[in-house]
Image (cartoon, grey):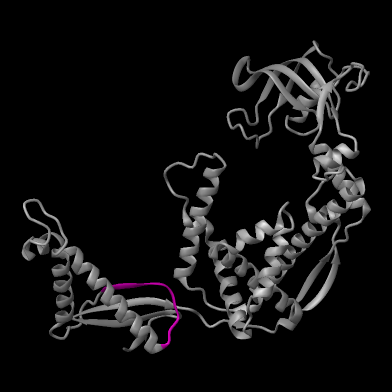
Amino acid sequence: MQVEQIGKLERRVALSLPVADLEREVESRLKRLSRTVRMAGFRPGKVPLKMVSQQYGYQVHNEVLSEQLGAAFDRAIQENKLRVAGNPNIAPRAGDATPEGTIAFDATFEVYPEVVIGELSSIEVEMPVTPVGEAEIDKTIEILRKQRVHFHPKGVAGDHGDGGVARAAAGDRVTIDFAGRIDGTPFEGGTAADFAFVLGEGRMLPEFESAVTGLAPGESKTFELSFPEDYHGKDVAGKRAEFSVTVKGIEWAHRPEVDAEFARTLGIADGDLGKMREDIRANLNREVKTRIKGRLKEAVMNALAGLAQLELPRALVEGEMQRQAQATMEEMKSRGMTVGDKPLPPELFREQAERRVRLMLIVSELIRKHDLKAAPEQIKAHVEELAEAYENPGEVVRWYYADRQRLADVEALVLEETVVNYVVGEARRKETPVAFDDLMGRSGA
């Protein structure tokens, strides 16, 4: 079958089917169907073929036509050794005369592009370097203490009292009643009773926190504040409001001491603080390794995206746009956001889709050209590394190996990592120190 080039990646091939073969297969299937089909007034297997044909003929004809066109298209692709990108569009041929006894169709489709990748040695890849020392362990312990904070009444004596003056300060949790008005009128969300928040966490506007700071239980204050123009509540954004606030209670934040009991809350059964620090060090090293891999992958992909020349198949890009739009909708729903009935316009995701397809084609070419593979021992090592973060690693390993799809997902990750490592091995490498807090995305404890 002759393949016609109608664009850089677009191709067209003519398909023809003998009518007699089509009708013969349709008749054969209808006869088989008549042996089992049920119709009122007839015993099974006794329904007249004519009635079966009247009810099911159109459906069976379409099924047979679709199958035979698919088989004819597959033969054309194999004969011409083409790699089809996306699904073909098959439509009845218009205009040309069709030989008697045949029906003709045109299949229009795209093929995968030629991918030309420049010299990998011409790119430079930054290799992040982040050591984990005692200071990083100390910072992590402080974060863990903050996560386990509990609050106690301020201004009282005792084991869980501070004995000081009960006035609101940064870090305290205050419980308040408040009422807000704009132009003398209450507004939605502007009134609350027994509302608790921690001063300094940024949950409330700075002017609101400033007004509450320094107040004692039972004290009230009236003040004005301006809502920012970009405030999430559109009804009040950019407006000035008057608030009345009454403090009902103040609690101070008690972070647990770093002792045996604290260690036990982190899974150290015997409460040994040395073991706790080593456990934290191991977890941090694991997390640092994962994040460095992520940064390295991003750097490699950015370099590859600019190094290769190729045309992008429209079908693959549009398919990826649809996938990303659907995935975004599902994520929004999972977060409890109202998304409505209308789908997101796929066009919003064109840039991301084009990049993803570009990188997919480049990575596929590198795998093909250099015969890169995910070896069984690499997959096993990756699974075991993932399992280390759990209490029962052996059980997690068995869980992965019990499901082919789970293992296939790991294999895909390992293969991607193999590609990254190959590119890094060929490229010029530059070690770049990255501060621990920057790598972890921390702004402080």
Left or right for 131, reference 38: right
Determine if the magenta segment contains residue 233: no
Residue that extends furthest to the top in the rendered view of this protein: 218
Left or right for 394, reference 234: right
Predominant SS of the magenta segment: strand
State the residue at coordinates (14%, 76%).
23
Q: Quadrant of residue 423?
A: bottom right
Camera-nearest residue between 263 and 216: 263
State the residue at coordinates (22%, 80%).
104
Q: Is residue 17 above or below residue 305?
A: below
Determine if the magenta segment contains residue 90: yes
Camera-nearest residue between 69 and 316: 69
State the residue at coordinates (66%, 56%).
395
Can you give x and y, in whole percent of width and height, for residue 170 in the image? 85, 28
Can you give x and y, in whole percent of width and height, for residue 146 in the image? 82, 37
Q: Quadrant of the N terminus?
A: bottom left
Left or right for 22, reference 234: left
What's the magenta region? 81-91
Q: Is residue 47 above or below residue 8?
A: above
Q: Is residue 438 above or below residue 320?
A: above
Can you give x and y, in whole percent of width and height, for residue 76 in the image? 34, 85
Q: Quadrant of the C terminus?
A: top right
